[in-house]
Image (cartoon, helix red, strand yellow):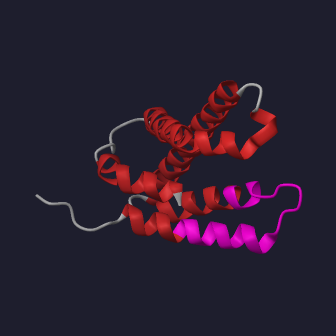
Amino acid sequence: TFLCCYLLISCRAMRRTDDLPCSSRIADGALRGAGLGLLWGIWYGPSEIRAAGGTAAMRPLLYGFRYCGQATISFSVLLGVYNGIFYSCEKRFGRTVVNPLVAGGVMGGILGYAVAPQHPQPSQIVTSAACTALLCAVAHFPGKEPD
């Protein structure tokens, strides 16, 4: 879902990056992901500190910084890898609906596995991959750009 929010924010910007090298696109995704992760950490950090209860009782500020840092790094890696997969597909298949389907499917599968890595559920992984792929494809092609 968050991957789709990223796409909704940046789908127009990605249309203007045809001539950029792969490393620039990955860096773009990582920077955008870092921004989203930072916002996520700031928004949900206080509730995570309250939910931690006794764990964060002695050092809530340190716990909050750690949560915010983890969210920033996680989103940065997630969206950097998404852009890398997307670019690879674009080089292979051209500008088609396959690109967000494959990149979204791979990232959705990874997220579906990450929910419970101790006890992976194949149905959960496949469902997450399929839904994310579909949402990414829909979000990436929102319609015709105005002239």
User: Horizontal and vertical percent for residue 98?
Assistant: 49, 66
Residue 145 position by quadrant: bottom left
Q: Residue at x 52, y 37 (%)?
A: 42
Say if the magenta span includes residue 61.
Answer: no
Q: Main secondary structure of the magenta part?
A: helix
Q: What range of the chain is rendered magenta?
A: 111-133
Residue 66 drawn above or below residue 45 = above
Q: Position of residue 8 (x, y in %)?
A: 38, 57
| Residue 38, image x, y percentages | 51, 35
Residue 122 included in the magenta stretch of the image: yes
Residue at the extreme right: 118
Front residue of 17/92: it is: 17
Q: Residue at x 33, y 42 (%)?
A: 17
Q: Residue at x 50, y 46 (%)?
A: 83
Near-viewer residue (50 or 99): 50
Tell me if I can see residue 22 in this picture.
yes
Q: Residue at x 47, y 38 (%)?
A: 22
